[in-house]
Amino acid sequence: MTATAGAERPTATEPLRVAIIGNPNTGKTTLFNALTGLRQRVGNFAGVTVERVEGEFRMPDGRRVAVLDLPGSYSLSAGSPDERIALEVLLDRDRQHWRPHVVLVVVDACHLERNLFLASQVCELGVPVVIALNQFDMAQEQGIEIDVPALISAIGVPIIPTVASRGEGLQPLKRALFTAAELPPPARRFVLPPEIEASLAPLVQHLEHGGLPTGTARMEALRLLGVRRGEQHLADIPDLARQLDSARDAIRAVGHTPEREESEARYGWIGELLKTAVRRRSASAGASTETASDRLDGIALHRVGGPVIFLVIMALVFQSVFSWAAPLQDGIDVVIHAIGSRVAGFLPDGDLRSLVADGVFAGVGSVLVFLPQIAILFAFIGLLEQSGYMARAAFLMDRVMRRVGLHGKSFIPMLSGYACAVPGIMATRTIDDQQERLATIMVVPLMSCSARLPVYTLLIAAFVPATPLLPGLDLQGATMLAMYLLGTVTALLVAALFRKTLLRGPVRPMILELPPYRWPAVQSLAISVWQRCLLFLRRAGTIILALSIVLWALATYPRADVDPALGEEARQEQQLAHSTLGRFGRAIEPAVAPLGYDWKIGVSIVASFAAREVFVSTMGTIYGVGGVDDAALQDRLRSETTADGRVAYTPLIAVGLMVFYVFALMCMSTIAVTIREAGGGRLGWKWAGIQFAYMLVLAYGAAWLTVVGGRALGFS
Amino acid sequence: MRADTVIVAGIVVAAIAYLLRRALRQARARKAAGPDCDHCAH
């Protein structure tokens, strides 16, 4: 029996549809980017792609190819939401009518045995297949000699060696996609014992009646034997569970174990295949088989040394964010200052000039100066991701994660949260268990995202002295590290609390693959940093600009009859107090007064619900530091006094304010993504409500405790 | 009314309109493809 049904050919006008699938961390996304010229995020750890991502490229003769990058899967199971996406697309069960003409299976040449399991399943789907033997160079370095022609004849599909990170093998691969589209789809290459085939026959027939092509039905029948839970993508086939149970009973009756049939059959076949097609060069006499990665892991994963190295790396990252960014920040400051003065100089004295100087340049400019910090932070994160160190960090964190009741897979979403909670929450799709997934969603926003960076930086630069603590680390860097650690540790504690109360359930162990260490690709690193910077600039030029303008208007109107005899600062103060913003601030002041904040911080906090960085631009607008000099805003904050002449902002209040920002969920986008990912509808709203409420209570309580506790201990 | 006051009023109204449109877009996106977070391109 062959799997011929279901194969489609592209028509003359439509592009060739190619779906890319493969085990996690085989370089699928790198290959996708190399083929399409797109810039999807790439990381040297599993679970970077959690959605279907589409791109397109053209052959030299103009033929179009549409490519779909599917999430990484070890097999065609539908356990977690991201694996389900892959299976639904390949079987067109998602009803999006994107059934691929060719499936491109990306196989890690260094781990053929495990990778070929998925490939052998895909080869039974009734769709032409091409295999990219990726990271071929690394396999050669490791002494793995692969007889590609032997593999081709054994598997029956085109196989192309590639090194996606260097663009090697792309042209033959592109040609092979078109060649494969013309070939009949591959079929199962191994034979099941006749008694198993006979036991499976009724189930295969049932699946065929349910609409699956012959080859797919045979593959699914074998696969379903080992699946414990219901399969959503087959939910529309009636009576499937009963048929499956009878197939299992029949297999048990002939002395076999249904759950093991598939893995035994596939791995048995793969084992035989590799015996003939792969040879390992034996290490020379006396030489160690230990690779450089193994030796590095001996240090990086050491029980004591590992966590210490992790902390040292993190401390260096945050210290560099401060010390390396400073000269660049000054440069940007000077440029913006020069442009601001020039533009304002063209305008006559009046409202328009004030809007440009105090609204646009003071507001947007005060945020723009943080661009170097964003760039440095993301350069480091990219470096750690691409080198493979992040996977080690995940390994180190696994023990901690399990202790708080989270799955080791939760580490990646939490790590993504350092950049932005939205992709972090979306990355929880790799977690199979709903309770574990919800617990992770609940705590991801506690990880300090990049929007908090300008707030921390402004307050630390203004109120924390650069006292040296250790070689290469001063008090400013340490304070920044403390804020990130505070968010992370609290996230773990809150997760433990959720797992012991609302989201109770067993903790399952994680199998983590440690990729070999790699030199980061400079180009891809530069692209990811550049993209982050562009996004930051786009945000500054859109939402922060619009909010700065609105806040300027609220701080300027209605106009007060200011006493001309007063000094500049006093006149400004009088106008602010009379303005809409001032009146609103006074109204909410009682709510923030217990935290030691005045109404100006109060309105800045309220304004930053739209975007956290707006806290900085609002302070810039309120203080009308039209010169957009970052240092000027820091000076104004330090010298600000209350009506009774006391210093308005002290280091203790600044620390309390940072603690507030560590915990408060002030981001509309995060709330929106939680609603969707927690189940949508009433359920989504419920969890988003719980998340917002607990974070607000935590933020307010912790900021209050910081200020009151600090005062009790004699700090000011 | 002075010319610059009119320009300022126009700019402020445009900024408010932009923010409202963005909020609306986010509310709609939540129901459809996903939230529009221009912070991380999601």
Image: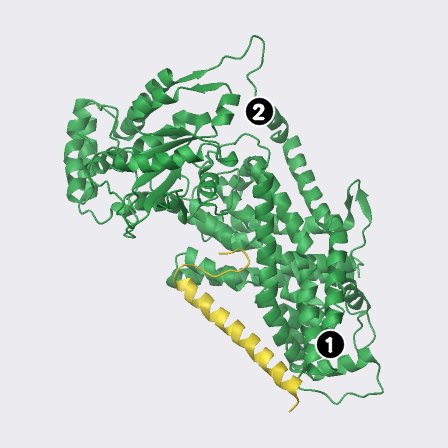
Chain colours: A green, B yellow
Q: Chain of mark 2?
A: A
Instruction: Report which residue position mark 1 lands on.
Output: A346
Q: Is residue A540 above or below residue A255?
A: below
Q: Does mark 1 fall on the same chain as mark 2?
A: yes
Instruction: Report which residue position mark 2 lands on.
Output: A294
Q: Is residue A125 above or below residue A329?
A: above
- Location of residue A229 in the rendering, given as x and y in whole percent from the top left corner: 30, 42
Instruction: Estimate the spatial distance between the alpha carbons at disc 2 and disc 1, rounded to whole Å.
Output: 64 Å
Identify the residue at image location x=67%, y=48%: A376
Residue A599, can we see it?
no
Q: Is residue A10 above or below residue A520?
A: below
Q: Place residue A696 in its image quadrant.
A: bottom right
**Residue closer to the observer: A683 or A127:** A127
- The crowd level at tag 2 (other Cα within 10 Å; few <14, some 14-19, many 20+) is some
Identify the image quadrant of the C terminus of chain A: bottom right
Q: Earlier in the sequence, mark 2 or mark 1?
A: 2
Q: Secondary structure at mark 1?
A: helix
**Residue closer to the observer: A393 or A12:** A12
Q: Secondary structure at mark 2?
A: helix
In this rendering, would A76 be left or right of A420?
Answer: left
In this rendering, would A164 be left or right of A232?
Answer: right
Three-letter amino acid code at the position of disc 1: Phe
Q: Residue furthest top?
A: A285
- Location of residue A478 in the rendering, given as x and y in whole percent from the top left corner: 73, 48
- Location of residue A297 in the rendering, given as x and y in whole percent from the top left corner: 59, 28
- The crowd level at tag 1 (other Cα within 10 Å; few <14, some 14-19, many 20+) is few
- Location of residue A115 in the rendering, given as x and y in whole percent from the top left corner: 39, 30
In this rendering, would A382 be left or right of A315?
Answer: left
Three-letter amino acid code at the position of disc 2: Asp
Identify the image quadrant of the N terminus of chain A: top left
